[in-house]
Image (tube, grey):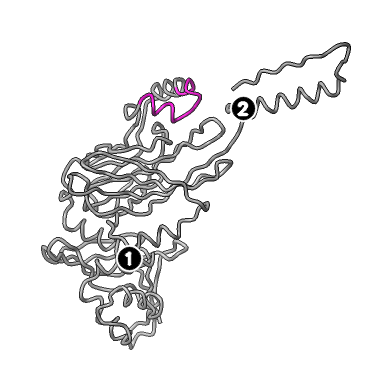
Amino acid sequence: MPIRSSISFQGETKMPHRMQALLLVLFCLLLAACDTSLATTNCQQSFTFLGKSPGTGKSNCGSTVFWIAEDVTGECQTTHLIQVVISENEAFVAMSDVKKYEDWAWMQEGIEHLSTEVPIELERHGRLWYFPGASWTIRAPVTSYDYKTEWKKEFKQYSSCENQWNEEYGSEEVLSPEFAGIKGELVYFYPEGLYIEYEIAKAYYFARSGYILVFTQQPALASGDDTMHGFLLFREDVAFSKLSDSEWASGALRVFFSLLHAGRYGEASRYCGKGCYTWLRESNPAVAANDFPALLMYGCKSNGLQCLEINRIVRVQEISPTTFKITVEFKDDEGKIFAIKAEAQPPSSHSFTISEFSYTVKKVDDRFLVEGLPPYLQ
């Protein structure tokens, strides 16, 4: 809001020139502080997916919740817990301020005690995003030069404010990613984001419930040099059973190792077949035979198992309609390919490295279970 200022003088008293100059400087500083177009707040957003409850939210029998963390740096310096609730096909959103900046340990620990649906994280390959074995891809939308020029000109009329833009146009000016092999219906978009000329920062696929969560990276800045990143939530138009069993098996294997690497042993045990536990029981006789999370924890922390994330799926072989042999590469915490040095059998004295590891995944009813454990190092 502009500041109106007047200086009045009584009688013959005159204000010294130095004082007038000082007041003029102060006036200009106040004006700049009140005009957001002149102030720089440099509020930079970052998002973290925390978890999702089971279910689809399509019926009145129950809802599903997505928990998302937002941290904002700069002068804003705030932390939000965003809850997107889907109930009877409608999206409702609640946002709470977290007392301590960037403090999410309490929330991550709390989610460990809840039943959740673990997603498959899509990987970037050039402009395409997909997960190994998937028959579909997504990519950021591509627009024409004329369209870019027109919207940039119009966006300036809103003082480069994404909230005003989204309030005016709603989903009409939200450009969805380009889907190939799958069709996504927009369920929700975060109003603090601008969804034109963006890049994809991260994407998750929830195979059981058919949701796709896309976090966006917007290179353009709002007034104050604030970022306009956000996220979009889609639901598949087709049933998730479109995925082949080999894709389900590959996804289950990837999720299993991701959970072990994250220390989420209770959730990981849901993906572990009976063959996982024989060696773990023998190595940990003091642990109850049916305490599956504890057995996996000791395996990763004490028994020499290298609980790493999968770098890529090398090949998938269908042994039978319900059994798949999947060969993978792992990556260490520095992102390097994990390899084990092995000695050749006599009479050869040469050593060699192993960087590919094979696992059996079996379909049991409607679940896909992993038979096997992470690589072992003494």
The CA distance from mark 1 to mark 2 is 52 Å
Q: Give how far across and how far down residue 54 sits, in percent.
A: 24, 54
Residue located beneath label 1 in the image: 257
Where, quadrant-wise, is the N terminus in this rendering?
A: top right
Where, quadrant-wise, is the C terminus in this rendering?
A: bottom left
* N-terminal label among 1 and 2: 2
Viewer-closest of 123 and 195: 195
Residue kind at label 2, given as amino acid type: Cys
Residue kind at label 1, given as amino acid type: Phe
Viewer-closest of 310 and 205: 205
Residue at 32 percent of width and 35 percent of height:
176
Horizontal side of residue 29 vs 249, given as left or right: right
Viewer-closest of 356 and 122: 122
Helix, strand or loop for the magenta stretch, by majority: helix
**Magenta run includes residue 372:** no
Nearer to us of marks 1 and 2 is 2
Count all numbered tags in the image, as a single digit.
Answer: 2
- Look at the image and give the residue range highlighted in magenta: 155-169
Residue at the farthest top position: 11
Horizontal side of residue 81 vs 78, given as left or right: left
Vertical comparison of 352 with 198: above or below: below
Residue at 31 percent of width and 40 percent of height:
92
Residue at 55 percent of width and 34 percent of height:
225
Q: Secondary structure at mark 2?
A: helix
Q: Give how far across and how far down residue 361 sits, in percent.
A: 20, 67
Residue located beneath label 2 in the image: 34
